[in-house]
Image (spheres, coloured by chain):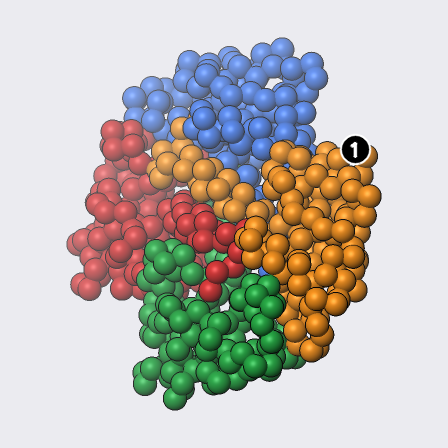
Chain colours: A red, B blue, C orange, D green
Amino acid sequence: MTLMECCQVPVVSVPPETPVFDVAGIMAEQNVGSVVVVEEKKPVGIITDRDITVRVTAEGLDPKSVPVHAVMSAELLVLPGTTGLYQALLQIKAKGVRRVPVTDGAGALSGIITVDDVIRLLAQEMDGIASVIRSGSPVV
Amino acid sequence: MTLMECCQVPVVSVPPETPVFDVAGIMAEQNVGSVVVVEEKKPVGIITDRDITVRVTAEGLDPKSVPVHAVMSAELLVLPGTTGLYQALLQIKAKGVRRVPVTDGAGALSGIITVDDVIRLLAQEMDGIASVIRSGSPVV
Amino acid sequence: MTLMECCQVPVVSVPPETPVFDVAGIMAEQNVGSVVVVEEKKPVGIITDRDITVRVTAEGLDPKSVPVHAVMSAELLVLPGTTGLYQALLQIKAKGVRRVPVTDGAGALSGIITVDDVIRLLAQEMDGIASVIRSGSPVV
Amino acid sequence: MTLMECCQVPVVSVPPETPVFDVAGIMAEQNVGSVVVVEEKKPVGIITDRDITVRVTAEGLDPKSVPVHAVMSAELLVLPGTTGLYQALLQIKAKGVRRVPVTDGAGALSGIITVDDVIRLLAQEMDGIASVIRSGSPVV
């Protein structure tokens, strides 16, 4: 299974100059906890609701005058949609990130996969496969 | 296993009149994503970094003049520390909540357990117990 | 949750003098992979379909003349039904056993729990609790 | 990840005419619970320790005079090594089988994957990915 087959589509994105106030509004309206920052369709950063609380509210900054690029995380793990899920897991674990923007063949943002998505996916698989175990009667 | 044995201790808490600005500062300093609001030691609400983004920043409110009780979630699942983990899971699933303040015998806040904690716990158990399966040789 | 609440009941058992041939017939009819050997209602051993293949068939013994006590596993992990599941997991992992006879207050056999049962149980819990995670919207 | 990358290699196999007595001996020596039956290198059946107990011992047959093809399971799920693990899981769940012989490009037996292997694999992934969740601090 590739990321293309299991990532969330569509993904909410904004340009780097967007004020944090607008980003917070988008998070509220779209019911998302993170927004990908894109420049010419390519992911250049990510911002979460936590980033806004910690880097804007706690710092006493004015969300209407701070552009998202000033407080986003610019160090990203970005993976092409053709990456296999298992390969993606290796990188997610190695980097310890919770959210991975997924790109198409041209490097443009096309989706996002989160650790929460992966946990739901693994839990479903585990439950499905565990149901194959019939206690005491290992047929074939 | 009871909640007392697996919940996070200590838990960060604030009184209801605390300004959201101070709460955001506490979240940044203590590296936590939620803070329990207590009155006379008893949990009366919970606030997350997301709540601050959605209910304060997105609404254009001033975090220095909004007290936490105005934007916290007051509908809580609170469980005594003597609750068994399995009973707790039934309630967490039924209510769909991600964070549960845990109380002592007097009803005072003594810890917190989150869905993330539970997932880590179950994943560890699953990995430990799966290692008992020796392929092809079911001894005893 | 105690073992009493999650173990398999009833459990198939035979006296120590039962010929292996009869035990194999019981395994086929009852569709079970193991049978507990009891003496005065107390578990004294366990025999699996694998034990019969390895200790009787492979050794060229006659299943009609070998009593089950001669080829059963006598080193057992037996736990009272009042044992918590979590405590049981610790012992199952420590001893590396796949099947645990469960006893009542008088020490009499009352059920059995297997690693396969535990895996199904944990997988169900994991799937249930993972469904609480709503991507991007950590409510409460 | 393909089956080729996660299946057990080598896999124990026997020709169809092998007496059950010899198969039982191989299971004991090689410490395996199943043996694949092959004809001209291709898997044509599988036999487990349980099959021997139920179809030979319980039936009162002589293991030295019964050839394995008479008591093996001939209805198999066989998958090429290039099959993705996720695709394999779909088929394992659909057919409810516990063991799947894996073949090379020429259809010759090259490995085996069992439900137990899959559970260990999923449990390891789950534990690894769950460790990425840091309570209260969803970084990136």
In this rendering, the answer to whether B94 lies above or below D1 is above
Name the chain under label 1.
C
In this rendering, the answer to whether D131 lies above or below C4 is below
Is D21 on the left-hand or right-hand side of C110?
Answer: left
Is D47 on the left-hand or right-hand side of C115?
Answer: left
The x and y percentages for residue D108 are 38, 84
The three-letter amino acid code for the residue at tag 1 is Gly
Q: Quadrant of residue D105?
A: bottom left
Give me the residue at 63% from left, 40% from top: C10
Name the residue beneath numbered marker 1.
Answer: C105
The x and y percentages for residue A35 are 29, 42
Which quadrant would the N terminus of chain C be assigned to in this image?
Answer: top right
Give me the residue at 60% from left, 68% from top: D60
Q: Residue furthest bottom?
A: D40
Residue C83 appears in the rendering = no
In this rendering, the answer to whether C61 lies above or below A130 is below
Label 1 sits on a secondary structure element that is loop
Foreground residue among B94 and C81: C81
The x and y percentages for residue D124 are 53, 58
Give me the residue at 50% from left, 36% from top: B115
Residue A3 appears in the rendering = yes
Is D103 on the left-hand or right-hand side of B99?
Answer: left
Is B54 on the left-hand or right-hand side of C16?
Answer: left
Local crowd size for mark 1, using a 10 Å CA cut-off: few (<14), some (14–19), many (≥20): few
Give me the residue at 49% from left, 19% from top: B76
Foreground residue among D128 and B43: D128
